[in-house]
Amino acid sequence: MPSPRSPSLYQVNTRVLLTELSRPLGRPATLDDIPDAELERLAGSGFDWLWLLSVWQTGPAAQRISRSNEPWRREFEHTLTDLREEDIAGSGFAVTGYSAHRDLGGDAALARLRSRMRRHGLRLMLDFVPNHMAPDHPWIAEHPDYFVHGTEEDLARSPLNYCKVQLKNGPLVLAYGRDPYFDGWPDTLQLDYGNPLLQQAMIGELQRIAGQCDGVRCDMAMLVLPEVFERTWGIACQPFWPTATASVRRAQPGFLFMAEVYWDMEWTLQQQGFDYTYDKRLYDRLHEQHARPVREHLSAGLDYQDRLARFLENHDEPRAAASLAPEVHAAAAVLTYLSPGLRFFHQGQFEGRRTRISPHLVRAPHEAVDEALSCFYAGLLAVLRQPMLRDGRWSLLECTAAWDDNATSDNFIAFQWQRDAGEWMVVAVNYSPQQSQCFTRIPRADLAGQNVRLQDLLSPAVYDRAGDDLLSRGLFLDLPPWGYHAFGVQWLA
């Protein structure tokens, strides 16, 4: 299957989806029960990738911790006012083995689903959790040297970061998985990347995963970078990702790596073999609701931007419909998803779901569909299906003052897409809470002596403009707060 320059990905909480499918079936659903009609719908909506969250085998130890952890349980009760014990399966990131969970149908059902997806032109993305394992992973008994050890003093001084485990040779103090800024995750144990044998074993796990899917989303990928790992644990280690990504691609050419990454380490991981890295910086700047920082972010080189995964929500972040006013949500979505890179959408986003579902849970509350938001996203997805938005050339446009003493041009972000001489789109957003005006520079010499029609693909607006005027002054824009255009440009005789 050819891969577009700017593909689209849809993330699904697999266990929540199967819980929903179980109700009409009257039995527990498995991956075999995901309907072909749903796969066809996603492919028809323009998606290239389906990321199935929480597919791997988990165990009872992490589940017990999830059910007994009081702060977590309060969160679960807030999500599900009728919470039941069976709703708490344990985190999908507390992995006991990289085989599809037996309750989901196992590896055979996963292989059948992947085959069905391929018939619809969909690629499969699954999770890889490099930093830690579940507390009942077999390696803990078989290879305790694969984990970060502590002392009784560590345990006494920092009980939120260490625990004592019972092994056949006696008790052992091990570290919880964590990042350097927060207490540990008590349903996981920290892997030791200072041990070369652990690195080899994790490459083996990646190679196993690569035989079951087409790409991986690597959880908190920056945590195993040598500089981060040593800062967290005081343990020196060799780089893992360059060796791991190259090793997998030797066996599986074209296998895709996407990194969950923060702390401005996106470029570092792109250079170490990742095809795409989370663009949390754009997400944060959009939430700050000021145009200039967004525009500055979009001024980066395309060698960087083409490899960013753009999102407005995911399983870790608050729902966009809950954190952004409707008009801001739409403007932010236009900027996020009409920019270059991988377009990353989340299950429930199109329907305007407002409740974030913890990856410890297997059920979501019932929420009514936001019809206006659903209609908006249907229009946006239709625009994204255009070949120009998938394989075209993108460039940022300059916005200048519409008249002296009018500073509102600073509220605009504008850019264009081009594919062939006749395919052209101009996108402009007033990312501010005030009516704003500007001229948008259109650097196309072929406009001279021509006329064009600007047809907004997200509204009924249509404008005819003289090319000479666009060249001399630019495209005049006067937009309401959070207003936007996505103009398809047609040449007129």
Image (cartoon, helix red, strand yellow):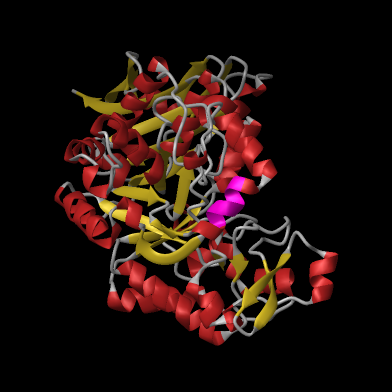
Q: Where is residue 62 in the image (x, y as percent from the top left)?
A: 55, 57
The one nearer the camera, 199 or 283, is 199
Q: Which residue is drawn at 50% across and 19% down?
A: 483
Q: In this view, does 460 lie above or below 154?
A: above
The residue most toward the left is 119
Q: Where is residue 67 in the image (x, y as percent from the top left)?
A: 59, 46
The quadrant holding residue 193 is bottom right
The one nearer the camera, 440 or 40, is 40
The one nearer the camera, 478 or 139, is 139
The quadrant holding residue 225 is bottom right
Count of numbered tags: 0
Q: In this view, does 346 lie above or below 53?
A: above
**Does the rendering let one see residue 12?**
no
Left/right placement of residue 321 relative to residue 23 reads: right
Q: Main secondary structure of the magenta part?
A: helix
Q: Where is residue 481 in the image (x, y as percent from the top left)?
A: 56, 17
Chain part drawn in magenta: 62-67
Magenta residue check for 141: no
Left/right placement of residue 267 relative to residue 251 reads: right
**Does the rendering let one see residue 477?**
yes
Q: Where is residue 397 in the image (x, y as percent from the top left)?
A: 48, 37
Q: Which residue is drawn at 44% across and 56% down?
A: 307
Magenta residue check for 64: yes
The quadrant of the picture occupied by the N terminus is bottom left
The one nearer the camera, 69 or 149, is 69
Left/right placement of residue 465 relative to residue 135 reads: left
Q: Residue at x 34, y 72 (%)?
A: 208
The quadrant of the picture occupied by the C terminus is top left
